[in-house]
Amino acid sequence: MKNFVYRVAIVGGGPAGLSAAIRAAETGLSHILLEAESHLSNTIHRFQKGKYVMAEPVRLPLRSSLAFEAGSRESILEAWSSEAARLEVNVRRNSPVTSIDKDAENFSVKLADGDIICAETVILAFGLQGQPNKLNIEGETLGFVDYHLDDPDEFDDQAIVVVGAGDSALETALDLAEHNRVILINRRDDFYRAAAGNRNAILEAIADGRIECFYNSVPRLIEAQDDRARLEIDTSGEMAEIICDKIIARLGASHPRAFLESCGIVFSDEEATALPVLDSRYQSTVKNLYVIGSLAGYPLIKQALNQGFEVIEQIRGKPVQPVEDQLLLDKLIGMPGADTVETALIKISGTIPLFDSTGARPLRELLLESLVLYPDPGATVFRESDYSDSFYSILSGEIFIHLPEENPDLIIRLEAGEFFGDSELISGRRRTVTAVAGENCILIETPRLAIKKLGATHRTVADILEKTGVERAIRWYLAPGLPDDECKTLERSVSCHCFETGTNLFQAGDAGNSVHFIRSGAVTVTRTVDGHEVPYRLVTAGDYVGGWDALADSVRRATACATAETSTVEIPGDDFRWLLERHPELRRNLHANFLAYHADNTEAIQQNGEIISFLMEQGVGEGTDVLLIDESICTRCDNCEKACADTHGGISRLNREAGPTFASIHLPTSCRHCVQPHCMTECPPNAIHRAANGEVFIDDTCIGCGNCVQNCPYDVIHLASDQPENKPGLWARLLFGFDETAFGDNGAGGGHKKAVKCDMCKDLSGGPACVSACPTGAAFRGDPEHTLFNTLKRSGKQLQEES
């Protein structure tokens, strides 16, 4: 039993906790750092050997006394341990905390060995990775089981079972497969939880036979057998056994919410992704109990280090403004009534209901990613058909939404507190309306990924976005001008659905009793021709499927299948017919739609269904601008590649020869500028953007981490070094035969590497150089719907010539 009362007890020796302890030691504040493991920084300690750790976010200054620069796992751990030893940080290792209680004055922190630590203040900084989910089966204590991988090079020519289907499990399996036999146990039938890059890499490894995989399988028993492990698994109801040397389970970690709630801490809501409620100084709903680091929703190391410093200064009675305050003030300058960050936050959360429930810290993070705009009256914020993806909140004034050209007289007025740009937030496609500023307008422009992250961690935000999205799907797109009472009636009967890639919305022969309005994703509509499923229409966000069958109240004549992750609003057939009775223009649109896709293209569709099926299988429907080459007229001159290299500093973003081919249609390795770009996922410096015309491009802030390379499912991004300025141009190479290898292998030479990909030559007035340089017109680009149409025309012409 310990009776000494520390000024502060810090639970967890990761970046946040260690930073706090370092600052306490520097300033002579009585403290104790309680670490459950035998070493500090357990999460980084468990990184794989040699892992490069990035110092993100780049824009955020480092305030902590604990030095931190990007580098290897080993160099960072050594520097931090040396600093802790130099300052004589009071660390107690191997001391898991089991409970925290508070009396009138102090906290009592009970340890697993029964000791009690008393402290005036407690900082919880133990992260989320300390409690890995267990297999919970007989035999897991025999010593064959691990829950992390330190160094894949420690294993050679062994049989290793990896259990899990998330990113960490797939990365572990792929690393070990270099020199071992790897068997992957997946409790599901897919890897949908993993990042696209990992998912594609593991599926390729399974297809190549480099990794074995048991789907729909669950471990049941582990036994020792001649110095090896015998693992029994239940695979789709049948028992199987695997003899192996090691079992590595990567099943995620248990969130310590129950422990935090036992301390009295309140969470923002009941969702699993909810965060603890904290004030602007990281204090929880329990006075003098602070939460920092990933436990508070800040997983980046630099954020955690700064928070450790700031919270100690707060406890010392010398509070400092959060390090991001100056960045925020620079953004908020000019906002009426926002003299400080705190008054600005109060004004924003009090005006915009969407942000009212988030709390100060998440709102700060959102504003760091956002811009404050002051558009002049009559200024266009965005136009119909623009390809931008920002989300806008109205802080004051008004915005006028002009609906599509077929409804020129319909203008919707939005006022302070409302938001717009949410449809593109969901769909990822072109703007379908025009937004014009009114008087005294102040807007907060937020990147799409930032608002999606907020919705993922705050159920209230997600609910508001969902409810508004359904209402606007009806009132803005499906039935513009629908009176309020009729809209409310329709809202009560519709339902929202999400479909995984390859899932049918409906199939031929089903009752045609509903219509699906596509909010995001894409759907291929097929029908049976001569016993084969032939696609004849690609339906993207903002359109609907099933309308003709619902109108006729007949069986489905076709099958609708999601070609990407798709969300829809389903309208019952009775309500859809009721809607058509009141809005004849919707019925006219339905008839025109039917004639366009069921009559005019029938013959061409029958002839070219296999080509369209091929393009859909290659993910063309996921793109917004796709490059195809008609090999029947391609001369293989490679002018397309050379023009691409000349336009981009000697580094080509196109590989003409690579990529699949069907008949004469070739799909080269070139960016498709996806609707929901996989490359944007997990880009630490947010270096990947979408231009107004739809081009997805990488700016100069790229740090070369390679996340985009890994996440792209189409292998169209690579890391390259800058080329020398004196590299010969296209004509010099053609006329004089300069050897390109003297100037580096496609930019892969020395120097700092950055990610490169096609940007559709967005800065060239003539459009993509690859298309302009093609002497025969074999290369052509376009969005999926136009690309499919052009492909049909080209293939149809070739068939006629051959016949």
Image (tube, grey):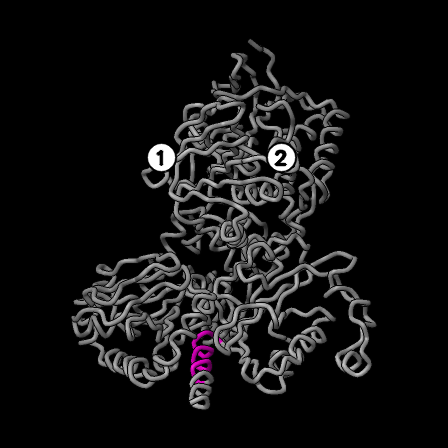
Disc 2 marks which residue?
A: 155
Q: Is residue 326 left or right of residue 412?
A: right
The verdict on residue 787 being magenta is: yes
Q: Is residue 397 visible?
A: no
Residue lying at the far top of the rendered structure: 1
Q: Quadrant of the C terminus?
A: bottom left
Residue pictured at 59% horizontal, 19% vertical: 94
Closer to the camera in the image, 378 or 206? 206
Neighbours of disc 2 within 10 Å: few (<14), some (14-19), many (20+): some
Q: Is residue 639 visible?
A: yes
What's the magenta bit mostly, secondary-structure-wise?
helix
Closer to the camera in the image, 291 or 131? 131
Q: Amino acid at mark 1?
A: Met
Question: Hey, which quadrant is residue 221 in on the image?
Answer: top left
> Which of the labelled discs sits on residue 239, or is there none?
1
- Closer to the N terminus: mark 1 or mark 2? 2
Q: Position of residue 622 (x, y in %)?
A: 46, 66
Q: Position of residue 626 (x, y in %)?
A: 52, 73
Residue 687 drawn above or below residue 640 = above
Q: Amino acid at mark 2?
A: Phe
Q: Which residues are magenta?
A: 783-793
Closer to the camera in the image, 297 or 560? 560
Neighbours of disc 1 within 10 Å: few (<14), some (14-19), many (20+): few
Instruction: Count the numbered circles shown.
Output: 2
Q: Quadrant of the N terminus?
A: top right
How many angstroms separate mark 1 from mark 2 (CA)?
28 Å
Residue 3 drawn above or below residue 424 = above
- Helix, strand or loop for disc 1: strand
Q: Position of residue 684 (x, y in %)?
A: 61, 52
- Helix, strand or loop for disc 2: loop
